[in-house]
Image (cartoon, rainbow, N blue to C red):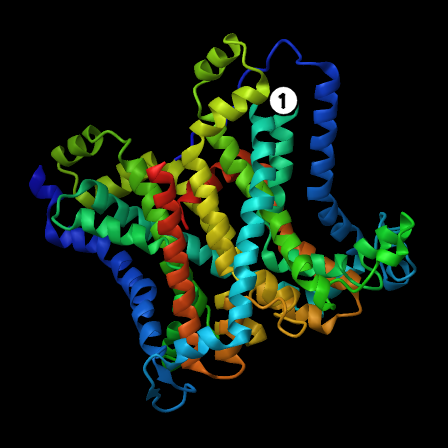
Amino acid sequence: MDKVFSNKRDIAVFVGPTLLLFVAIVLVPIFVSSYYSLLDWNGIGRGEFIGLDNYIEMFTSSRALNSMKNSLLFAAASVFLQLPVSLLLALILASSIKGEGFYRTVYFIPVLISTVVIAQLWSKIYNADYGMLNTLLKTVGLPELARDWLGRRETALVASFIPILWQYVGYHMLLMYAGAKSIPSEIIEAAKIDGASRVRTALSVIIPLMKPVLKVSLVFSVIGALKIFDLIYVLTGGGPFFVTEVPSTLMYTTIFDTFRYGYGSAISVFIIVECLVFTIVINKLFRTE
Amino acid sequence: MPAAISERPGRSRAAGTVGSILLQMFLILFAFVQIYPLVWLAFFSLKDNSEIFSGEVLGPPRKFLWTNYARALSEGNVLTYFLNSVLVTAATIVLVLILSAMSAYAIARMKWKLSNATMTLILLGMMVPIHSALLPLFMVLRNLNLLNTYWALIIPYVAFGLPVAVYIIASFFKSVPREMEESAVMDGCGVYRAFFFIILPLVRPALATVAIFTFISAWNELMFAVTFINDTEYQTLTVGMMSMVGTYITHWGVVGAGLMIATIPTIIIYLLLNKQVQQSMIAGAVKG
């Protein structure tokens, strides 16, 4: 029997193609990017080796630093604004409320829609002349609040946060809901018999038991914010005057608009390392507690 | 992995009628916030400019202007983008399913020294953002003259889709009893036949999960699509939408129709299989 399941050729046939694709397309490029990041190179001919100069430039350029600041603000907004709303919704729905399935299904719809569509939709919502937001403001008698939300420096960044927070609230809600539902009902019943109120039960019984799923949500919202590309690229392209730029869009324009392949690669390496560091830190935080 | 979605039997004692009415109002309001922008999109996809620009942008269209859809499909090239998306997504799903099922099987069931190491490597791969591969892949695809072909998207989509897929299917294999395939092999059926005719049918639920998850990510992907394809003939919906919006910047109705066409397949799948889609997104939550 063991002979049949340990035939080397069969194993190679089963796992070989996957491994090959994975190594060639997912793993090797990381090293290639790291190498590119040490070059001064416009993609034509050979690049010149310049050591860590691209990284030094990245950490001293106010444009790059601003993009990093934006992605960190984005991560903070996800963690402190989006996740609490998701948690609240998840706890309400998990408490067997009327319409549980309906609400869950509806809240989740935006998650499935392409971010390109979401971004185009929100650019119409924000449109200065005919957009939904300004029309609403005029309808309720607050025309002085209407403005060009994405076109002005003061509002562009916040206005570009909102669509993504809106889109993924339902995703974290679903993860947390599943986590809350997987808690054995006896534990919750026991708390109730002990006279704990609903809020009390949620705070001291349900939420502590949801720790694993809360960790997943935290990692996803932080990493998702650090990697964000689609929404900003379509909605503002990083403008006006780079105020909404994030590392991914800066990487993209550096490579494909200004043809600075080395510097762009340094930004991509920064994004990978940043994501890795945050994943490890969040996992550590949850382990030691 | 979080457990399946199932409704617990409702509680018999309503905990304060006023409280639960307020709660329902909050939930309905939130549902409205989540859904109204999409309804609004559906509305303006059926309007003409005079209606949109006369300040009646919020409500339903006075008369349904289906010609917006016809214009988007033909003049706006959305039909081409749509078919390209279907082709790329379908090929990605099929390849991901075959490759991940085979390798998950080898990892979970076959006996070889490096099987655990391989699994760890693939799990690590789930954390790699696609940003890291963008420029190196662009260079390779350019040198191989593969830019502006379907393969330029299918190959990277498959490679980046494999880690989660292998993880999901391998975990599922662990719940399938070994006796089935062992007795099959004992009866003289080779590993390949045992795999395709006995094992694969058993892991159908895991395959469905992977298929849905892969569909959502391939259908919606933008970064590779915008970089590797600039020929309209091969553009998928996400990139196509961007160029269409540029062309029809003042024709909201046509743009809206294009966005609706890009979204409708996902919505139909979701309406038909909403529990399965939700479970699949939960299972996919191992990807960072």
Residue A143 left/right relative to A272: right
User: Which residue position holds label 1?
Assistant: A97
* Residue drawn at x 26%, y 62% as measured from the top left: A20
Q: Residue at x 32, y 82 (%)?
A: A51
| SS at circle 1 | loop
Q: Quadrant of residue A45?
A: bottom left
Total marks in image = 1
Tell me the kind of residue under disc 1.
Ile
Residue A148 pos. (x, y %): 78, 65
Q: Is residue A229 visible?
A: no
Residue drawn at (29%, 68%), measured in percent from left and top? A28
Residue B138 in percent (x, y) is at 42, 75
Please give left or right for residue B5 compared with residue B22 in the image: left
Q: Residue furthest bottom?
A: A45
Position of the N terminus of chain B, as image quadrant, is top left
Residue located 81% across and 62% down the image: A147
Q: Nearer the viewer, residue A266 or A253?
A: A266
* Coordinates of residue B88 in the picture (x, y in percent): 48, 61
- Look at the image and tell me whether residue B224 can be seen: yes
| Residue B222 x/y as whole percent | 53, 63
User: Can you tell which quarter of the image residue B220 is in?
Assistant: bottom right
